[in-house]
Image: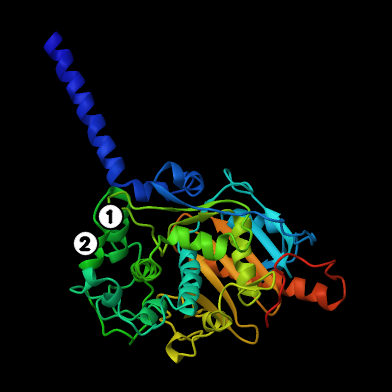
Amino acid sequence: MRASRMITALSIGGALGAGIAWVWRHQGAIGVRRPVNEWTFTHMSRIMPVQIVRSAPRMPLPRDRFPLEHVVRYGAAPGRPIAALFDRNHVTSMVVLHRGRVVQESYPGRFASPEARFQLFSLTKSVTSLLVGIAHEDGDLPDLGATVASFLPELSDSAYAEVTVQELLDMRSGVGGAEVWTDPEALILAYERAVMNGGSVFDVIRNAPRVRPAGTAFNYSTVDTHVLGWVLEAAVGTPIADYLGEKIWRPIGAESDAFYFLSRATPRTALGGGSLNATTMDLARVGLLVAQGGVWEGQRIVPEAWIERCRDAGIPELAVGALDPELYPPAYGYSNQWWTFGGAHRAVTGLGVHGQFLFVDPVAGVVVAVTGAWDSADDDARDAEMREAMLAITEALEAREATGEFAPRGSAPGVGGAG
């Protein structure tokens, strides 16, 4: 009897051990599935090691509420309720700014709140770009034509060795194939497994294959931006979290600490392409900095020329509609880690998988920061709906301003304008 119980206990223990091992191996996939992802995307600090980005809060942004309840449109129907947009697209938070004032703040997600720090995924890339621009202007990274190996000699035997900083910025490294999350052989999945399961991120990057000559074609790559983050850290001699805190977070008076989650295995590394977590309001502040041409309260933080380059690369193959239509929506172009819209306003957006957006129209003075918890990493239909809704919000705020209904009262913190 005792032996039978022991065998049963061992069998149960073995099954539990196998189950735990399976969950460990597949934790990345489990954590991004609905409805679990609404918790995951607001609790990354409980899942992964982190490095804090210190804030220095000053005055909160002023408020001038403008009801957006029926100004959004998507599909063929104008004036749809904004709550329906949230439900259809699993929006967890939204902050809208107009000329530096908060006109909309919503937290429909289960675990969302003004204090929640949301996993921003690839919106991190756009922030990394701003930091590279600052380092370039400060002389720490003076030559954007310098190669990866000149900063990271440990990658001198990799496909990244002769890739330039500018080629990383524009996603033209030629390393790795298409970033398709449904392809089990994709480089992005090997990279994710290394980050989440304690593998070697360095080995994944060092062994990434070259698929075309550098500088010849656009290929969106989170690994490119991870390497860019390493280059930045090598150039400035400090971790990216500390550099963000010093150069942007505290100067713009961010209201809350942010954090980067780190890879599990040592040496731990922040993901310059995807691990920044912040409140939606502080994300909107970053958008406001871009809308104002890199100026905050009269202080130049990001070079004006860098902001202009983010709005238009001036490279035909990166122009709106020129990206591979089988992989990227034709509404977008790309430049310096930002997705571009072209047109007279030259608006831009940062994008993150599962429904993260930071839309910036410097001419209209509109910033829309959105976090989401989509079922899948990419969803062209949801992306189109959210894009259309953000453009409709911009049009409504422009119309209000044109009719004189909007008149800034006093000076809003950071308002400097850019056109």
Identify whether 218 is placed above or below 123.
below
Q: What's the residue at 49%, 68% (across, down)?
A: 380
Q: What percent of the width, then of the height, locates residue 382?
A: 54, 64
Identify whether 193 is placed above or below 225.
above
Q: What percent of the width, then of the height, locates residue 198?
A: 27, 49
For this view, does 88 lie left or right of residue 243?
right
Identify whether 16 is placed above or below 255.
above
Q: Is residue 355 in sight in this rendering?
A: no
Q: Amino acid at mark 2?
A: Asp
Q: What's the residue at 44%, 41% (across, down)?
A: 46
Few, some or many residues within 10 Å of mark 2 (<14, 14–19, 20+) = few
Q: Earlier in the sequence, mark 2 or mark 1?
A: 1
For this view, does 246 lie left or right of residue 296?
left
> Which residue matches tag 1?
194
Question: Which element is circle 2 on?
Answer: helix
Q: What is the quadrant of the C terminus in the image?
A: bottom right
Q: What percent of the width, then of the height, locates residue 403?
A: 86, 76
**Distance of label 2 from label 1 (alpha carbons):** 9 Å
Question: Which element is circle 1 on?
Answer: helix
Q: Is residue 72 in sight in this rendering?
A: yes
> Which residue matches tag 2?
203
Q: What's the residue at 23%, 30% (across, down)?
A: 15
Few, some or many residues within 10 Å of mark 1 (<14, 14–19, 20+) = some
Outermost residue on the top side: it is 1
Q: Amino acid at mark 1?
A: Ala
Please name whichever residue, 86 or 122, is drawn nearer the observer in this view of the structure. Answer: 122
**Quadrant of the image occupied by residue 1:** top left
Q: Pointer 2 and pointer 1: residues touching (CB < 8 Å)? A: yes
**Quadrant of the image occupied by residue 104:** bottom right
Q: What's the residue at 82%, 72% (across, down)?
A: 400
Figure coloring: rainbow
Q: What percent of the width, then of the height, locates residue 174?
A: 29, 79
